[in-house]
Amino acid sequence: MQNWINWTVNWGDPIDISVEIGNPNRWMRAWYQEAPKISPVVMGDFVGSVESGAGVNFNNVFFNPHAHGTHTETYGHITKGFHPISALRIPIVLKTYLIQIKPAIKGDDLVILPEHFEKLRAFGPGSMEALVIQTDLEQNNINKDFSDSNPPYLDATCIELMDILGVQHLLIDLPSVDREQDEGKLAFHHAFWKVPSNPQKNKTITEMVSVPKNVQEGWYAMNLQVASFHNDAAPSRPVLYKMESI
């Protein structure tokens, strides 16, 4: 639990860093999946569309939580047992740091390395509950299919400092914290959740966020809103509120 006594929070200016599912003008997708499908229910003569004469709009939605838009996942993403996101109890407000990073070139890859986070060490152990990593400073990820593009990813050794800082909820503007093609190792996922040695059941990873261009690096209060799905991952809507020390 964080001490909020010495901070002011601008609750009147919410910053939504999610990418919604099904918006044809603002989307992200990955993992070789086609666009999500949202269409009216058709039952006999009934078509669930007001434009088609129905009293209500009544749509079916087909999508994949990991492939379409902003989503939050549990350690159940990489375990044999079933651990649904709906079982988590995430605090209503999380003390959060937003860091802006330009990944390093490493062979054919772009990689986020421990040195990118070194300046955070000055904040001290247990200083933050959540960390948002912004790599897309120009919003080039909007309207993008990441499939077969070898996006940047996190080196698993970054977890050492994140553990010191107390990060329980990690958010990133990429489709995965791990390399797109890594032979199923998912090294960072395993390091973050300490699977299989000591599973951290209350920690989450949120992928495919989008931070507005005018938002600056620094401290925020965050409300991590996650849909209640009986699944290892679900669509989510992280909302930031600027914090200032007093």
Image (cartoon, helix red, strand yellow):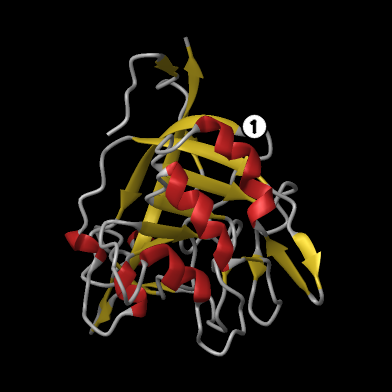
Q: Which of these two is toward me, 29 or 180?
A: 180
In the rendered image, the vertical position of residue 82 relative to residue 236, given as above or below: below
In the rendered image, the vertical position of residue 129 relative to residue 157, given as above or below: above
Q: As drawn, is 79 to the left or to the right of 96?
A: left
Residue 45: quarter of image? bottom left
Q: Amino acid at mark 1?
A: Gln
Q: Residue at x 59, y 84 (%)?
A: 182
* Extreme-bottom residue of the structure: 183
Q: As drawn, is 153 to the left or to the right of 84?
A: right
Q: Residue at x 67, y 33 (%)?
A: 214
Residue 181: quarter of image? bottom right
- Residue 42 placement (x, y as % from top left): 29, 79
Q: Which of these two is toward me, 36 or 137?
A: 137
Q: As drawn, is 116 to the left or to the right of 82?
A: right
Q: Residue at x 42, y 61 (%)?
A: 71
Secondary element at tag 1: loop
Q: Which of these two is toward me, 23 or 219?
A: 219
Quarter of the figure with the N terminus: top left
Q: What residue did someone put label 1 on?
A: 216
Q: As drawn, is 174 to the left or to the right of 42?
A: right
In the rendered image, the vertical position of residue 64 relative to residue 88, given as above or below: below
Count of residue discs: 1
- Residue 20 placement (x, y as % from top left): 47, 56
- Residue 80 placement (x, y as % from top left): 27, 85
Q: Residue at x 42, y 47 (%)?
A: 167
Q: Can residue 53 be seen in the rendering of this structure?
A: yes
